């Protein structure tokens, strides 16, 4: 079976593998679209009766992705996140989308005992510089940045909606939840166009709708995951799967590899080589819990509240490192 590929935007290579085995009775053909958003390739695969329907649906989904990224990116000086940081101690009216993401982020922060924290922005900025320069952040700078971190300093008023950052210098970094939320909303947008058999993927996060024709679900390959997780991922429908690990982006100093995944409780990049994968009912939840588990590594406290959330299945395993040749 062939997959029609359409490149509406610059093409990048997809990061995760999905196996398609559609039956002979499939209503329509699979179409694949790739565009660069959020600084990475975003891939959409959908089943539609014809190519024009697929193109219209893909354009609508990518337009929605771009709009949400413009709201939530901490890289863009004109984003809502950055404007919020410029008005500390004030109640700032925000979009419904930003309010919902921050509300969910606070819930996950509370349920993870702070292993996930959306106010980690000032510390993350130091580690971005470290990856660029190859030098660790100054301990005094980490100490000062940590003083600006604390999810409990976020005020939420759903009636407006409005958000208040109580500490001057606080900066939201929604990188651990926004991507999953945005992909989920892209899937929702596809559904509004009448496309229900679809997959949206970017940077280790996947959200899926109804199963491909003739299949029980989308087959997502998750090497290294435990058997129960792999079995669920092999037949995934109307759910999200997120992957977070310390091995993708890092800086290595004096033989120690510090990940781009930063522990909000210490201000340090995590140094383990564990990969966390999470299946949940929606992309934002899966993304945030995977980030929290990546921070916790193998030290997940028994009974941690976030693992009791409905629909959550998790797997944490070691990522093998390549060995030098002899």
Image (cartoon, rainbow, N blue to C red):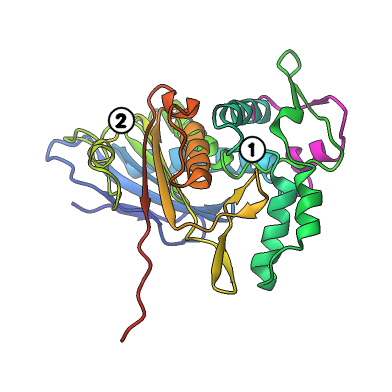
Q: Quadrant of residue 234?
A: top left
Q: Residue at x 64, y 25 (%)?
A: 103
Distance between the Cα atoms at labels 1 and 2? Answer: 32 Å
Query: Label 2 crowding class (10 Å Cα cut-off): few <14, some 14-19, many 20+?
Result: many
The residue at the far left in this view is 24
Q: Residue at x 55, y 27 (%)?
A: 111
Q: Is 31 covered by the magenta stretch?
A: no
- Whole-percent x and y of residue 194? 39, 28
Q: Residue at x 40, y 57 (%)?
A: 14
State which mark lies toward you, 1 or 2: 1
- Which residue has dot 1 on it? 117
The tag on residue 130 is none
Secondary structure at numbered mark 1:
loop
| Span highlighted in magenta in the image | 76-97
Query: Label 1 crowding class (10 Å Cα cut-off): few <14, some 14-19, many 20+?
Result: many
Report if residue 228 is visible in the image.
yes
Q: Earlier in the sequence, mark 1 or mark 2?
A: 1
- Whole-percent x and y of residue 21? 18, 45
- Nearest the camera: 111 or 232? 111
- Which residue has dot 2 on it? 210
Q: Is residue 126 left or right of residue 37?
A: right
């Amino acid at each position: 079976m062939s997959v029609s590929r359409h490149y509406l935007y610059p093409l990048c290579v997809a990061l995760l593998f999905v196996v398609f085995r559609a039956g002979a009775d499939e209503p329509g053909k699979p179409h694949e679209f790739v565009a660069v958003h959020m600084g990475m390739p975003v891939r959409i695969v959908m089943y539609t009766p014809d190519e024009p329907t697929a193109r219209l649906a893909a354009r609508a989904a990518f337009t929605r992705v771009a709009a949400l990224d413009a709201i939530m990116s901490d890289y863009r000086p004109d984003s809502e996140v950055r404007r919020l940081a410029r008005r500390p101690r004030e109640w700032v009216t925000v979009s419904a989308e930003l309010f919902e993401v921050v509300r969910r982020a606070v819930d996950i922060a509370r349920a993870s005992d702070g292993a996930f924290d959306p106010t980690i922005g000032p510390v993350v900025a130091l580690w971005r510089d470290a990856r660029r320069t190859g030098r660790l952040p100054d301990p005094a700078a980490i100490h000062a940045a940590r003083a600006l971190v604390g999810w409990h300093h976020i005020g939420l008023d759903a009636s407006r909606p409005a958000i208040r950052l109580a500490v001057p210098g606080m900066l939201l970094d929604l990188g651990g939840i926004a991507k999953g939320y945005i992909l989920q909303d892209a899937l929702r947008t596809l559904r509004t166009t009448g496309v229900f058999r679809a997959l949206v993927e970017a940077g280790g996060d996947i959200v899926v709708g109804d199963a491909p024709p003739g299949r029980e679900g989308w087959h997502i390959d998750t090497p290294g995951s435990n058997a129960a997780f792999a079995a669920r991922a092999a037949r995934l429908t109307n759910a999200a799967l997120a992957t977070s690990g310390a091995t993708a982006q890092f800086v290595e100093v004096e033989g120690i590899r510090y990940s781009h995944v930063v522990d909000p409780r210490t201000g340090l990049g995590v140094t383990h080589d564990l990969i966390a994968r999470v299946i949940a009912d929606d992309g934002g939840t899966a993304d945030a819990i995977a980030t929290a588990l990546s921070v916790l590594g193998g030290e997940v406290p028994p009974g941690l509240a976030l693992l009791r959330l409905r629909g959550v299945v998790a797997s944490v395993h070691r990522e093998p490192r390549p060995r030098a040749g002899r």
